[in-house]
Image (cartoon, rainbow, N blue to C red):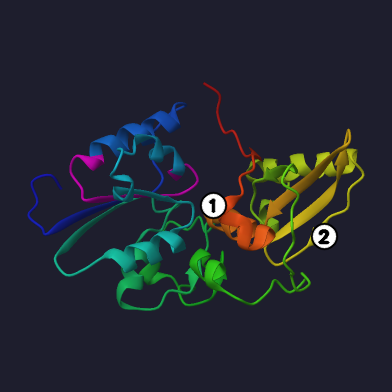
Amino acid sequence: MKSAQAKRKIIVFGEISDAGHKKGAKYAKTARLAQNIADVTVFVGTWASSALKARKPGEEDKLRAFSHARDATEYIKSITREGDLILLKGTNRQDHLQRILLAQSGKVACWRQDCNRVSFCNECPDLNKPSGAPLLLQQQNSEAPTPEAPPSSPQVLEPDLQVVVGLGNPETKYANTPHNVGYEVVDQLAASLKLNWDATPEAWIARGSSKGRAVCLIKIRMPMNGIGTGLKQFSEKAFGSAAPKTMFWFTTISTCRSAP
C-alpha cells in the first residue's frame, strides 16, 4: 500500500488473530503504522476500539473503529469516491469483510457476526437473507419508538442529580456476557436501592434517592458504538432547552477486557 499509486488510500482491518495476550497494544501499534500510509484507516470487530489509542491530535477522522461490519460498511460507502484504493485485511471466519466490497455495488442482507463459515460471502446462499444486528445509523435516525417502550416525554433532571450510566448492548444475545457489564452493574445498584426501571425509546431509567441525594440510573438503548450519540440525544431531551447551559457528571461503567 505504501508504494501504490492512488488518489486516496483506505485500509480496513478486521480481526488481528495473531496478536497474542497483548491484543490491545497490537491493535494500537498496527493503527500507528497504518496512519503513516493510509488517508483513512478503519478497524472492525470486538477489539476495534483498542486502535483508537493511536489517534493523532487533529486527525481523529483518519482513524475509525466499528464493532459491526455493517456499520463499517455504511461508513466506508459514505466516504469513498472515484480513485480510492481500498485494502481489506481480515480473517474470513471472524470478519467476512468481503461484504464491504459486495455492498458497494449490490445488496447484502446478512450481517451476522457469528457465522463461522470458512467461505467467501459471494458464494454463500444466505447472503441475501436478512440477519444480524440492525444498522446503527438507522437506529440513530429512526423516529419510530422501540415496540415495548411507551412514548417518551421530556424529563427535567435536577441540577444536583447524581447520574450513573451503565454501558452495554440492548440485543438479547449480549445478556450475561462481558459486553453488558455496565448494564449489570446498574441493575445491581437499582436492586440495592429498591428502584424500578421505566422504559423509553432512548433508555431504561430508574430514579430514586440514596443518602438524601437524588439518583438517576440510565441504560441507553443503543449499541456501544453509538453510546455517545445516544447519550447526547437523551441529555438534550432530559434537560430541554437548558441543555447547552447545564453541566453534570456521568459515572460510566463499561467493559474492561484486560488489565494493565
Q: Give the range drawn in magenta.
A: 34-48
Q: Residue at x 21, y 68 (%)?
A: 81
Compared with 185, 226 (above or below) is: below
Q: Which residue is drawn at 54% across and 52% down?
A: 228
Where residue 231 sits, quadrant-wise, is: bottom right
Query: Label 2 is placed on what type of residue?
Result: Asp
| 112 horizontally vs 242: left or right | left
Q: What x and y, as percent, mark residue 117?
A: 47, 58
Seen as rendered, the residue at the extreme top is 260
Where residue 148 sits, quadrant-wise, is: bottom right
Instruction: Check if residue 56 falls in the magenta segment.
Output: no
Q: What x and y, as percent, mark residue 86?
A: 23, 58
Q: Tell me if I can see residue 221 in this picture.
A: no
What residue does disc 1 label?
A: 228
What label sits on residue 92 in the rendered view? none
Distance from label 1 to label 2 (Cα)? 21 Å
What residue does disc 2 label?
A: 198
Crowding at dot 1, Cα within 10 Å, few <14 / some 14-19 / many 20+, comes out as few
148 vs 214, nearest the viewer: 214
| 72 horizontally vs 2: left or right | right
148 vs 111, nearest the viewer: 148
Query: Label 1 is placed on what type of residue?
Result: Gly
Q: What x and y, as percent, mark residue 141?
A: 53, 71
* Label located before the other in sequence (1 or 2): 2
Q: Residue at x 64, y 39 (%)?
A: 249
